[in-house]
Image: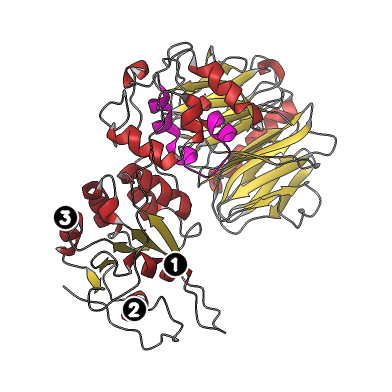
Amino acid sequence: MPSATPSPAWDGRRPATGTEPGAAALLGWLTDPDAPRLCLVTGAPGSGKTALLGWLAAHGPRSGRTRRRPARVLVPLAGQSALGTAWAVADRLGVVAGTPGDLVGALATSEARPTGRAVLLLTDLHAAAEPDALARLVTELAEVGRVRLVVEARDDTPALAALRAGPRVAVVDLDGGPGPLDPVEEPARPLPDLSDPAAVCAADPLLVTTAYVTGSAPAGVPGTLDGPEPSGETADGHGGLRTAWMRAGQSLCRAQPPADRALVLLAALGDGADPRLRPTLAELAAGAPWRLRWARHRGDLTPPWPGPVTVLGAAGGPLEGTLLVGDRTGTVRLLREADAGSAGRLAHAVPGRIAALAPAPDGTVLILDDRGRLHAVRGTASRPPYLERLTEAVSATLARHPGTALAAIGGSVVVGDRLGSVHAFGLTGLHQAASHSGRVTAVAAVDSATPFVCSGGADGTVRLWTPGRDPVPEPLADRRSPVVSLHAAETPHGPLVAVAWGDGLVELHRPEGGPKLSFRPGPPVRAVAVTGSGSLLVGTDESLLCLVPKK
């Protein structure tokens, strides 16, 4: 098997005494484009393996160099399960993953902008809770073109031996000379009571994850890497806490106050959970910036889960208080905003998937299909002839130039396109703005005292624009992740803008000023919406949540 070689370009800044040859070899491996994607750092206890990876994580380019280096992400594996590691890596690299397999798929298919190329530095494989499962995850990650991995473990680790036997592996062996002692391993920390929500929210989340996965706590059951169980929550030995934790784990494992963790756990709790958990978690979440109004999850029965969410709409006019929830099959369900109870289905004949919904004030629902074509589903009220003509004109335009995003207010229809432009079709003519670099992923229109259009793009920006004027030069938000959904509405608290990004973050913005609020449900967010009362809707593949901001 190949070995890494020293880098002639190394500038001489020294790591810890005794590990200089290993440091040179690692830098040579990093700068060699033809080197294997996996590098193993081996050695006996005390040879300085962990210290070397810590140095590599902090080692920067030579003075005066401006070339941007790939991100180096240090993730300790001591005490970790494969699932906890997948959540930690996904969070650091700006993707969302419910399972280790999801992590591999997300890194292989996500856009390059959120993370670019990255080097994962994984320490203490010999001390992991699931070393064999982690070795399999490492092997799969090494096949992803944008990721390189450095894995550290003692020589006598069976999982390391399996990795070392691979056909494309570089090895840095630190047993050639004395090095600094590796950090002394901490004694095992006591496990929290995994059926006590207060203990779970206050404990080390990685410790909680490992205990839930391995079933190593009192009253535990054998763990699984397949995510939440579809049913039987009270049978998980913890009243439903384990199922909720597995559902929202990536969010729960982030550094945050216990009150915020309690809110995420409460939002992930299914209706089959121990009824005593909900009021306890609500009390623990009292200091969080949100109040959970309701949540519906896969497997819920009262009321039933409405199905996977791909698009959301909050209707006004004749449909005031009604939510429109579209799934991947093209079905659009109508739900009561108050409790997510069923109010029927939208009678439409749009074939295939639905890319966007735009309820108009007169009760008509405009639909953008996945080919970028416009369809109109009439409401119970008669439409003025000028609105019919406007809709027909926009439909004819999109038949020639497909759209990627859709919104509607009063006498206007707003469309985004794949080139980054936003088009506002109105009774007074067409207004356009080149708002984004790359595809427009979502648009919203607000009929407030000063009507405005809000748009989000694959470039990670959210921008405001009043048709007929120049766009606001500074973005409302700008992050290193694509916008996947956006919605805005006029509320009793002023206009609110909800944004969801590809890394699982949801934010609520107040364009007229005020605090920005954020929430991470855990799974990938597919759609968001703001209701006329000011509530936030968050839709995922297996959940629909309704949150109310406290401020």
Highlighted range, magenta: 240-263
Question: Which residue is the site of mark 3?
Answer: 158
The image position of residue 291, as x and y in percent, is 64, 25
In depth, the one of 181 and 206 nearer the eye is 181
Residue 504, position as x, y percentages in the image: 51, 42
**Residue found farthest to the right:** 449
Picture quadrant where residue 387 is located: top right
Q: Mostly what secondary structure, the magenta segment?
A: helix
Q: Hey, what amino acid is under mark 1?
A: Ala
- Quadrant of the rendered structure where residue 363 is? top right
Q: Is residue 85 above or below residue 16?
A: above
Q: Residue at x 44, y 39 (%)?
A: 205
* Residue designated by label 1: 57
At label 3, the amino acid type is: Pro
Viewer can see residue 140:
no
Q: Please name whichever residue, 91 or 482, is drawn nearer the observer in this view of the structure.
A: 91
Query: 153 left or right of 392?
Result: left
103 is higher (above) or lower (below) than 273? below
Q: Mark 2 packing: few (<14 Cα in 10 Å), some, or many (20+)?
A: some
- In the rendered image, residue 341 lying in the magenta stretch gets the answer no
Figure colour scheme:
secondary structure
> Which residue is label 2 attached to?
18
Please say whether residue 251 is one of the residues in the magenta stretch.
yes
Tell me: residue 470, above or below residue 180. above
Q: Quadrant of the N terminus?
A: bottom left
Amino acid type assigned to the residue bearing label 2 in the image: Gly
Image quadrant holding the C terminus, namely top right
Residue at image location 38% in from the left, 78% down from the top: 17
